[in-house]
Amino acid sequence: MMNETLKVKGMSCGHCVNAVESSVSKLQGVSLVKVDLNQGEVAVEFDDGKTSITEIHETIKEQGYEVV
Amino acid sequence: MMNETLKVKGMSCGHCVNAVESSVSKLQGVSLVKVDLNQGEVAVEFDDGKTSITEIHETIKEQGYEVV
């Protein structure tokens, strides 16, 4: 199990939190996603045999946010 | 037909625009809703025999925003 905390730009409200958390949590192998709106951070716990940090980045970008 | 432009606080992103536009446009008698995110404004065209400015305010508040 891997834990990563990503810096993400552009999340501004509760809808953004939901968009990121719900899309990332749907990826196979993701066991936890938690957005910290004030810090602009997304903490993810995942099985890197089932998904990858690249796929997680792509999913967040598809929702309209920038992973920095 | 009435036209009103409301000052609304707390709308920060495209999700907020959708939340306000879709909820207000569902009210009976509302023929147009347009959010200007930069100006923090919501323009509404409505038939005041079918809805009221009070009901429009309430609907926006229910979505989590402040009508000022």
Image (tube, coloured by chain):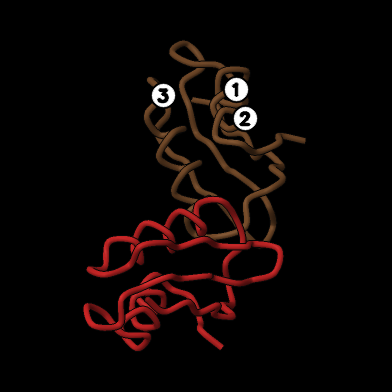
Chain colours: A brown, B red
Up the image or down, A52 lies above or below A9; here it is above
Q: Along the polypeptide, which appears first: circle 1 or circle 3?
A: 3
The structure residue drawn at horizontal position 43% and vertical position 73%, both measured from the top left corner, is B64
The kind of secondary structure element at disc 1 is: helix
Q: Mark 2: few, some, or many residues within 10 Å (few <14, many ≥20)?
A: some
Q: Horizontal placement of B2 versus A3: left or right?
A: left
Residue A61: numbered disc: 2
Instruction: Residue B6: give x, y in percent of width and height.
Output: 54, 80
The residue tagged 1 is A58
The structure residue drawn at horizontal position 43% and vertical position 39%, both measured from the top left corner, is A32
Q: Establish whether labels 3 and 2 are both on one chain.
A: yes
- Of marks 3 and 2, the one in the foreground: 2
Q: For marks 1 and 3, give the CA distance.
A: 11 Å
Is the Cβ of the residue at disc 1 closer than 8 Å to that at disc 2?
yes
Image quarter hosting the C terminus of chain B: bottom right
The residue tagged 3 is A27
Is the Cβ of the residue at disc 3 closer than 8 Å to that at disc 2?
no
The amino acid sitting under disc 1 is: Glu
The amino acid sitting under disc 3 is: Leu
Q: Along the polypeptide, which appears first: circle 3 or circle 2?
A: 3
The structure residue drawn at horizontal position 65% and vertical position 38%, both measured from the top left corner, is A65
Name the one closer to the observer, B52 or A60. B52
Image quarter hosting the N terminus of chain B: bottom left
Task: Tell which subunit mark 1 falls on.
Answer: A
The kind of secondary structure element at disc 2 is: helix
Residue B37: numbered disc: none
Task: Tell which subunit mark 3 falls on.
Answer: A
Up the image or down, B46 lies above or below A21; here it is below
Task: Tell which subunit mark 2 falls on.
Answer: A
